[in-house]
Structure formats: C-alpha cells, structure tokens
C-alpha cells in the first residue's frame, strides 16, 4: 500500500461524522416528495444507512447518528434561502442543524436497537425543551406572588434529592413521566450509585432533567409520577413508585406498583410479573415545609 493511501486512511479516522437518520416511516414518506431523494422503501433505506455506518466503523471512524426532521429541514432551507430539493442542502442541514440536536454514537449496534435509542433520546430532549417553555410561561402565583417556576424548581429539586436518598445504594433506573398542560413529558436517570462515604445522588445531568420535568408538572398542576428500579450487588431488583399529587410525589403502595407494572397499558390485560423482581411501596419523601406549589 502506498504512503499516500495509508495517510488518507489514517486521516479518515481523525474525521468524525454525523449521519442524519429518517427513523420512522412517516418522516421517510415526507422526504419522498423531493425528487432528488431517491429512496422509495424505508426498510431498504435503513439497511443502506446501516451499511454506511458499518463501513465507517470498519475504517475506525467515529460516527454520530442524529434525527433527520423533515419539518425542521424545510424551515432550515427557508431561513437560509436554500433549495430544499438537493442532496447538498440535506447534507448542510445534518451538519449545521441536526448535528447540534440529540444524537447517538454508533458502536456497532443493529438498526433495531439504534432507532429506539435515537427516538428515546429525541423524546427526552423535546421534553426538556417543552418543560423549560412551560416553566417560562408559568407566571406568578395569585395567592403568594411568587414565581411559579422558581417555587416549582425548588420543590422538584428537593424531591429529586429525597428520591436519591430513598433509593439508597445500587444501580438505579429512574423514569419520571408527567402530563403538563396537555403535553407528555419524560425524563430518565440511569446509573446512580450510593457510596459508603457520601449520600446517594443521581448523575447531575439526569437529575437536572428529572427536576425540570417534575417542576413543569408541579407548576401546571399536571399529573404523572416516578418509577424507580434498583438493582443491588447480587442482582436482586426492586421496583418502587410515586404519583404526583398536590405538587409532591406521593408513594404508591406495593399493590399499586405491581398493578402498574403487570397491566398492559394498551389493553388493560394482566401481564405476568417479572421473575426475581420485588414490587415494593414507594418511600415517603420529606416534604418541604414552606413554599407555594400552585
């Protein structure tokens, strides 16, 4: 192999890349209105993208996969005066806009794992943006004059700290789901560990996402709750739950946690319990003595 070809190959390893992915069929169908978009089958398109990702990985190149959003692409082109029906405009959108949004690093995972990872990350990103917008528009409480957002963020922060302490040691998977002003919001925290010489804490970025989403629910008198799964050092798992009520996470009973996990959300049919999982009541969290939550 010539020195020039070797240098070029080494250089490609130093060049990170971003691939914009049309993750669902509806977005793929929206792009088919552009004649220069030559794909006509979503499944085949996903296989082609996977081939590109594998080829780049084989060359040692790092690739991030971002969500390609057709409405966002149309706005991007209109704002910059670009002709939308060109591959160059699509590349520019991925490099300038989609690449700044939620993305998943490609590590060889198959497409049927990569797509849910990307959609989940995008949903959580949208939840944070929506929660921040709802808090910004919350205004002041008519009773006490305090900014609802400030009060809700303070209460949510106390709830997240109390939750981390209640969960204790072990690997954690915490999901907060809230319906605020008609919008579904979700935040997820993974990997919290309790240390012997320090109180348990959730990872800061995840804890902040939980605080933001929970605060949006508190400020808008929304509904929702928190579910936490703890795995100890021996692999035993415990699931606990809380519902958002009167501006604070109220613990669910063990029976309520079991019913939530062992019922099909779409059909209402019972589901078998997971083997080795204990469905436990939520732990009461210390409620702030002062502060408005409305």
Image: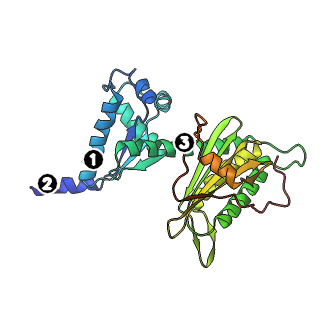
250 sits to left or right of 86: right
In this orientation, which residue lies closer to the viewer: 149 or 49?
49
Residue 234 coordinates in the image, percent (x, y): 50, 69
Cα–Cα gap, marks 2 and 3: 44 Å
Residue 83 in view, yes or no: no
Question: Which residue is at 33% across, 53% downward?
Answer: 62
- Residue to which mark 2 is pinned: 4
Which residue corresponds to the image point at 36% horizontal and 36% vertical from the top-left?
A: 91
As drawn, 63 above or below 90: below
Element type where label 2 sits in the image: helix
Chain-order first, disc 1 or disc 3: 1
Dot 1: element:
helix
Q: Earlier in the sequence, mark 2 or mark 3?
A: 2
Report which residue position mark 3 lands on.
123
Q: Please state which of the two labelled residues, at mark 2 or mark 3, is closer to the viewer.
A: 3
**Residue at x 22% of width, y 57% of height:** 10
For residue 185, the mark is none
- Asked if 128 appears above or below 281 in the picture, the reply is above
- What distance separates the C-alpha of mark 1 from that of mark 3? 26 Å
Mark 1 or 2: in front is 1
The chosen color scheme is rainbow
The residue that mark 1 highlights is 54
Q: Name the spot of residue 191 as percent of width and height, x first.
A: 53, 62
Q: Locate the N terminus by quadrant.
A: bottom left
Circle 3 residues within 10 Å: few <14, some 14–19, many ≥20 = some
Q: Quarter-wise, where is residue 47 in the image?
A: top left
- CB-based contact (under 8 Å), mark 2 and mark 3: no
Q: Is residue 188 above or below residue 170?
A: above
């Amino acid at each position: 192999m010539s020195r020039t070809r070797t240098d070029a190959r080494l250089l490609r390893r130093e060049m990170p890349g971003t691939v914009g992915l049309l993750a669902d069929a509806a977005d793929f169908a929206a792009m088919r209105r552009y004649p220069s978009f030559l794909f006509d089958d979503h499944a085949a398109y996903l296989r082609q993208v996977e081939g590109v990702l594998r080829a780049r990985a084989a060359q040692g190149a790092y690739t991030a996969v971002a969500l390609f959003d057709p409405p966002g692409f149309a706005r991007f082109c209109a704002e910059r005066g670009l002709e939308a029906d060109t591959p160059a405009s699509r590349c520019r959108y991925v490099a300038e806009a989609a690449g700044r949004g939620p993305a998943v690093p490609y590590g060889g995972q198959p497409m049927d794992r990569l797509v849910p990872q990307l959609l989940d990350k995008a949903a959580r990103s949208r939840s944070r943006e929506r929660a921040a917008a709802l808090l910004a528009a919350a205004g002041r409480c008519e009773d006490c004059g305090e900014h609802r957002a400030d009060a809700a963020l303070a209460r949510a922060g106390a709830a997240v700290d109390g939750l981390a302490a209640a969960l204790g040691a072990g690997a954690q998977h915490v999901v907060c789901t809230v319906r605020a002003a008609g919008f579904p919001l979700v935040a997820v925290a993974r990997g919290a560990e309790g240390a012997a010489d320090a109180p348990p804490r959730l990872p800061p970025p995840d804890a902040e996402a939980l605080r933001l989403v929970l605060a949006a629910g508190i400020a808008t008198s929304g509904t929702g709750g928190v579910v936490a799964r703890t795995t100890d050092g021996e692999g035993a798992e415990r699931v606990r739950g809380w519902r958002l009520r009167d501006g604070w996470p109220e613990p669910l009973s063990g029976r309520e946690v079991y019913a939530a996990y062992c019922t099909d959300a779409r059909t209402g049919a019972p589901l078998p319990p997971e083997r080795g999982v204990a469905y436990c009541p939520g732990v009461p969290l210390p409620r702030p003595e002062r502060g408005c939550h409305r």
